[in-house]
Structure formats: structure tokens, C-alpha cells
Image (cartoon, grey):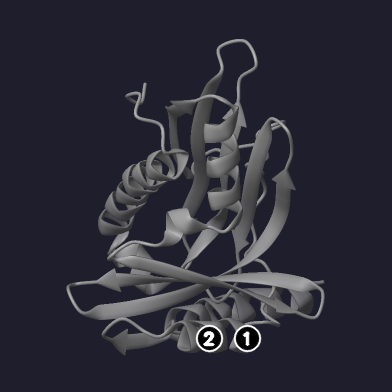
Amino acid sequence: VGLRAASTMSLSPLLTLCVALWMPPVRVGRPSPLAIEEDALRAAAAPLSKYNGSTDLDAPRLPRGWHVNRAETVIGHGRPAYERAANALQRLELLEHTWLTARCVCATDRELLAVCSRQWGCVWLTNTNLVLRRECGERRSSVSWGTTRRHVLAGEETVCVTHDASTDGVRFTVLSFSRPRHLFSAVAYPYVLAQQRRFARDATAAMERACGNSQPAG
């Protein structure tokens, strides 16, 4: 038992060092969709990051001590607005901005989501996620993904559009929890959190445009 414990303790710093030394794909200038897809395929075998929790909106389990980012906004009204928003969400249009882009790639039985973000003006970093759940129904459309070990964070995120039958309102929700799993994100974590808040704002604006509803968001 003593030898096993000593072996585990010696491997832990080594694993930490390996995680710290791995760097996500870095490019100067916005990469092409093909380049992002290739990044995703190179990470196809990467397992999910370790975390205990879920952003499933039916039964969310948000782990203690992790940063939670949640934003909810009424983005429109009416069935046509919901259908437009639901379709846009399934196409992940909310991930397309001047500073952010993404591509979904299927590899064997997995759907990978590679997200590429601009850092410090002209440097772009790609992180790979695994799509965990998709739903597109009469009243709710959602996509959930978790970070793989080819991501500088550990955690999970859900984006969702719902149509309230009683108010006719269309609501957009972003829910995520995360923590650093790489030296880069640990050092720059305040900046990472600011980017998460920026994503919530920009994604909400994108879904409002997708709704095509002129009524103000609530």
C-alpha cells in the first residue's frame, strides 16, 4: 500500500506538468473553418475533463467552488420567433462573432465542437469540446457540451431557447460552470471570466437577431 501511495503521489506532479505543458493550437489571424475542423479531429480521442456536475436545465448540478455563469433573457415573442431562434441555436450561430468562431465535426460516434477565440488582438486559440446533449422540440431547443482534455478549462455549458405557452415569450439561457485546468487559464482567469461574460452578452444579441422580433428583450 505504501509503495502504491508513493507511486500515486509521484505521478500527480508529472500529470500536472503535462497538463501545463500542453498548449492549444495557436495562430496569428483568424483561422479558416477547415483549420478549425482539423484541430477538432486531432483532438478526437481526447477524453472529457474531470468534473462532477451537469448543466442539464431539467436537473442542474452545479459543483461547489466552480465559477458559474448564467444569463437569461426574453429575446422575442411568438411561435415563428421561437422556430427561427431554435433553428439558429442548433446551427450554433451564437458562436459566430468577430472574436469567436466554431466548427462541429463528427468523429466515429462523437460530435466534437472546436471553439476558436481571439486573444490579445490577433492571436487565436482553439479548444475542443464534446457535444453531450442536443434537443430540438416544440417548446425547447438546447445544446450542451463539456470540455475535453484538449481545452484550457474544465467544465460544461448549455445554451437553450424555450417558448413559454402562457406568455408566448421566447427565452434564451446560457448556463456554464468552469475552473482552470491549465497554467494559461489559471494565470489569466480574470480575463477568462470576462470573456465568458462577453460571450453571454454577444450570444444573447445573436439570438435576438435570429428571433427577428422587434420587441425589446426583457
Structural crowding at the residue carrying mark 2, measured as other residues with C-alpha within 10 Å and reported as few (<14), some (14–19) or many (≥20): many
67 or 76, which is in the foreground? 76
Where, by quadrant of the figure, is residue 121 drawn?
bottom left
Residue at horizontal 38%, vertical 48%?
A: 206
Question: Is 11 situated above or below 159?
Answer: below
Q: Residues within 10 Å of mark 1 (few under 14, many from 20)?
A: some
Q: Assign the N terminus to one quadrant of the image.
A: bottom right
The kind of residue tagged 2 is Asp
- Left/right placement of residue 122 relative to residue 23 reads left
Instruction: Find residue 132 and report its horizontal and vertical position in percent.
Output: 71, 57
Name the image quarter holding the C terminus.
Answer: top left
- Of 62 and 6, the residue lying toward us: 62
Q: Which mark is residue 41?
A: 1
Q: Position of residue 73 (x, y in %)?
A: 42, 28
Q: Is residue 64 left or right of residue 47?
A: left
Disc 1 and disc 2 in contact, CB within 8 angstroms: yes
Helix, strand or loop at label 2? It is helix
For image coordinates 64% across by 44% down, the residue present is 142
Please indicate, yes or no, whether residue 174 appears anywhere in the rendered image: yes
Q: Residue at x 51, y 76 (%)?
A: 16
Q: SS at mark 1?
A: helix
Identity of the amino acid at label 1? Leu
Task: Determine whether 24 is above or below 51 in the image.
Answer: below
* Residue placed furthest toward the front: 80
Q: Which mark is residue 39?
A: 2
Identified at 32% across, 78% down, the residue is: 124
x and y percentages locating residue 31 in the rendered image: 37, 84
Q: CA distance from mark 1 to mark 2?
A: 6 Å
Residue 60 in view here: no
Residue 113 appears at what percent x and percent y? 58, 69
